Amino acid sequence: MEIVKLNISGMHCSACSATIEKNLQKIPSITNIKINAISGHSKIAFDNTKISKEEIASLITSYGFPTSLDDSKAQEVAYIKGLKQRLFVAIPLFLGIFLLHMGGFHSAWSGALQLILASVVQFYCGYPFYKGAKSFLKTKSADMNVLIALGTSVAYVYSLYLFALGGSVDFEDGFYFEGSSAVICFVLVGEYLKANAKKRASDGVAMLASILPTQARLKLESNLTKWVAIDGIQKGDVCLVLSGEKIPLDGVVLSGKAEVSSAHINGEELPKLVESGAEVVGGSLVLNGELTIEATKDANAFFVYEMLDLLELSQSQKPAIGRIADKIASVFVPSVVAISLLAFVVWLALGKGLAFALSIAACVLVISCPCALGLATPLAIVCASMRAKGLEILIKSPEIYEKAGQIQTIIFDKTGTLTKGEIVVKECKVFTQKGEDFVKSIAKTLQHNNPHPIAKAILEFTKESKMLELESKEYTIAKGVKGEILGASYYFGQLEWVETCAKVSTLKNENAIALARENELLALFYLQDSIKENAKATINALKKRAITPVILSGDNAQSVEKVAKELGIREYFASIAPVQKAQIVAEFAKKGGVCFVGDGINDALALREASFGISFIDATQLAQEVGDVLLLKNDLWGIVEVFDLANVTLRNIKENLFFAYVYNIVLIPIAAGVLYPLFGIVLQPAFAGAAMALSSLSVVSNALRISKIRLEKCEK
């Protein structure tokens, strides 16, 4: 199997992408189809022994949607340019027709001039709609193009018929050249504005790819270098990156030392010093120094590209609320055509005349555009995805936008999630009259040059203290250290071990390590895993949103209890194995929606059991892959932003669907003439075209509001 990425233009909404998917699915050699109606990007899996990617592109083009293998934006730009050119022709010609029709110029030359101008509008400016409608003969799937082409053709052909007969100009028997031209003009305006709005919404996705440089300096066996395109980099290739250059690949540093900034990838403002053995991500900037880096992945698997694929995949998928709208849109066009024919027959049977009946039929066809309905969900999701990217959040599945509102419980792993995973000394209790300075000096001397995490915490705590002369030192693995200082033996380590060696009594069940000498307890150093910044604010914000926080940790009960109390979390579980984590999450899920937040390999099972899982950019690779949401910054407040953005997006989708449904429910009956018997109100095709364009624009403008809506900021 092979995967091809295509650019598809001319799609107005998800009804168009559904038409393409429906017809491609009939081909056995094509197995997996993902199409983003907003960006125009598609990803299609196919059997390359039975069909080529060129043939697939040709097929989609034959459905009425021009398709290219080129990944550039040239086709989209060309489509917008074509719309603009047709608009420049359509608007002045329509105004000319309108003035002739409404200005009282009722003569043969006026009718002839209207016919000439309307013909240019109909067949040049309206060509894209005819081209799209032509695909109906092949796909048997009707879309917006069919409605526009059919509705305007009815008005145009009937006007042509009247002109040929020398028809009069009163309402019952008048020309509708201005009506057909107005519809095409208004629809082109709407399409042009929508295309520009969709382009702005999708441009942010394409910007991700620009994070990586286009070329890499590849090191050869002869120690020479040559520039190669990054797409050609394979796992095991070695590249040289100099100061001021972007790292072109995901890999591990073989040699060199440099400060590296990854602010635009993970949001960390401060650069990090990296040297041999450190892992680096493509797109990071080398501020100073130089690095020799070995690629740990092929180019197509680099993190930036994976993130790009995930972002586009999330936009091409649909939540349940969107799939319902798509099903309605798929039967919408045939239903509208049926209503139009019924209205025509009814008014003709009531003796209102052919002109009136055709006008009503044309209005129903023109005003009933499925685009507002089809754009309601996908455009909101694209705008939400780009807003999330701006907040340094990657939402992998659009299902999150619905699921977030159903969450009742949020379960946190402790170490590395609520806490930094870095041990610190919270407090030192001194029991000797020699004082704290003496105790710190002994502790610093005993732990000097010890790489253990606890030793690092002790050294950080005692960094201002002076070193003493160490006569000898002996480590006992997993217990502690014994040292001879100033002619005395000192013991520093686990409580029970110090009690046994120094023959002293310590405080039991304390999360601390003891320092003692023979028969004398000198001090207890209380340790804790430091809580992350914004952790308390995040927990309080989630509580305000009626989401109950719970801690689920493999750490000991004392450590978990301390963190829970400090953060105000009532329910917690300690000393839990990975399988037990998943089981507990599953039990909570039976009571309601559950979100799990974790960062380790041991969290992967729990992440999968939850309604959805959240992980971090610095989490283990497995946790990153399993989580449904990836925070690209090491900030817990991003969790609150996920929930707030999801609520905003779901509300926006519902508003869009409301606009689309109400528009059609109210205006289709009016277009069919239900108000005419009582109030004498009937729509002209021109007004129907304007109303149709307005409905789509209302959905587009509402979806674009997602990028501007204020989300709550973290109060530190």
Image (tube, rainbow, N blue to C red):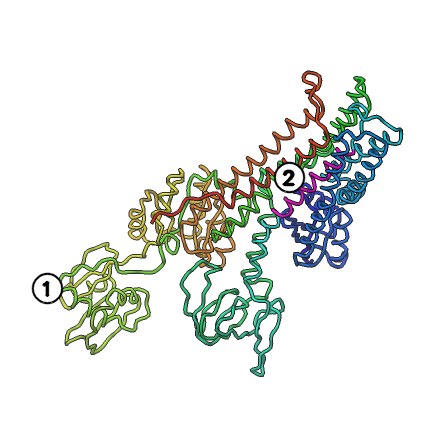
Residue 42: assigned label: none
45 inside magenta stretch: no
Q: Is residue 649 visible?
A: yes
| Residue 430 against residue 405 in the figure, above or below | below
Q: Nearer the viewer, residue 583 or 359?
A: 359
Q: Nearer the viewer, mark 1 or mark 2?
A: 2
Quarter holding the N terminus is: bottom right
Judging by the rendered image, the residue that carries numbered circle 2 is 374
Q: Amino acid at mark 1?
A: Gln
* Residue 101, position as x, y percentages in the image: 77, 31
Q: CA distance from mark 1 to mark 2?
A: 78 Å
Q: Is residue 44 visible?
A: no
Q: Residues within 10 Å of mark 1 (few under 14, many from 20)?
A: few
User: In the shown orientation, is residue 166 left or right of residue 207?
Assistant: right
Q: Nearer the viewer, residue 219 or 523?
A: 219
Q: Amino acid at mark 2?
A: Gly
User: Helix, strand, or loop for circle 1?
Assistant: loop
Judging by the rendered image, the residue that carries numbered circle 1 is 433
Region rendered in magenta: 177-197
User: In the shown orientation, is residue 410 left or right of residue 122?
Assistant: left
Q: Nearer the viewer, residue 98 or 485?
A: 98
* Residue 509, position as x, y percentages in the image: 24, 54
Q: Residue furthest right?
A: 165
